[in-house]
Image (tube, helix red, strand yellow):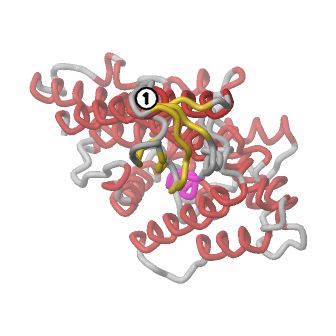
Amino acid sequence: MNTERLKVLVNIYIGKYPELIAGDHDVRHKWEAVADCVRTWDLNAADFGNMFEQATEGATSIIEDGAVNPRAGILYLCNHGFSSEVRDAFSDLLVRDGSEVSEKQVKAQRFVDTINSLLTDQAPEEWQYRQKMRTAIRYLALIHPEENYFFRASEATAFAGYTETEEEIGYDRSFSLQNYYRMCDDTAAYIGTREDLLKTVNKGLTQKAKQTGNSDLVGIDPEHHILVYDLISSAYQKDFYSEKAANRKSKISAVAQRKLGRTRERAHLLDVRETVVDELNHVKSEQAQEKIPSLVDTHASHQAYGEGTVTEQNGKYLTVAFPESTKKFALPGAVVNGYLTFQSESVMETCRNMERSQTKRREVENKLNSVDVQLSMLE
């Protein structure tokens, strides 16, 4: 890691701190959310759902992303008889067994798969309830902040690029929690040497504690893990990278400037990718709800073969017996393209809706592929 560049970001953070704690987007809410969660969390609570709701009440802006609401997914399962399964999933995620960070990533993925499997069975239409890898990592950072860090791919990518972190953090299937935590650990070690930064932040937290009566704020982050993430997040969200101090030509060569430009573009594309993935999950959820009704013994008309009867149905595939032959068709294409018609308007409309969903899915998949191609070109 280039500590000179890290030093620049820390200096900008200190200079902008009054702005960062002003208004509705006060960054100290991260410390408040963690303090509230640590104080309230009880894995063995009799009413796990109620405990989870209270523990994460102040962390909705951290856990949720736009239209995605994984916190509501956990509450949905707890309120519909699956508290035990959810508790067990959290127990596996949070176990402190001294395992490597790479194993922690395996547990996070297992947590995501377990919860999403339950949600797919119980609430297939609620695509926004699905958990993601970053959701599991955020739960870890909320409940065990001294061992974990919050994460967002775009923010981490921009920070790693600017500070010249050697190991690739990646995203999606290539994501490495171990490399991300290593970068954060290096940042935390440097932050520990910056008395000016710690004094500034502690003063802000002390003021907030007096305002809210939350005395846990000042001591909740002895390892500086929340502060590390706030630096990473603020640098991206407030665009520290565009500040003059971060781009002095005497400090950064023209070649390095171009590399940083590509890194910032890549970080932006990761945000775009998250939005597209959410859009694709929405379309998939809608498709999962579209069911072709049973059409066996239903009369069907064909342009060339005349009147027929559906004799067999296997999902979207139909076998239709006509006076002179028997033919197979695939829905919704056979209806949308005008080959088959049914007397039931509801069947016709279902097929048209399915075709629209398929078209939409292809469009979104093409959009996602385009973003992935652009990302690969910036590697």
In the rendered structure, the answer to whether residue 289 lies left or right of residue 42 reads left
The quadrant of the rendering that contains the C terminus is top left
The residue nearer to you, when weighing 330 against 242, is 330
Place of residue 260 in the rendered image (x, y in percent of width and height, measured from the top left): 23, 29
Q: Is residue 136 magenta?
A: yes
Place of residue 60 in the rendered image (x, y in percent of width and height, measured from the top left): 71, 42
Q: Is residue 294 magenta?
A: no
In the picture shown, does residue 60 fall above or below 181?
A: above
**Range shown magenta:** 131-137
**Residue 1 appearing in the image:** yes
> Which residue ends up furthest to the top in the rendered image?
244
**Rendering quarter of residue 254:** top left
Place of residue 175 in the rendered image (x, y in percent of width and height, measured from the top left): 35, 54
Main SS, magenta residues: helix
Q: Residue at x 63, y 49 (%)?
A: 297
The residue nearer to you, when weighing 290 against 83, is 290
Residue receiving disc 1: 339
In the picture shown, does residue 258 fall above or below 183?
A: above
Tag 1: amino acid: Tyr
In the rendered structure, the answer to whether residue 372 lies left or right of residue 148 reads left
In the picture shown, does residue 24 fall above or below 164?
A: above
The residue nearer to you, when weighing 62 against 145, is 62
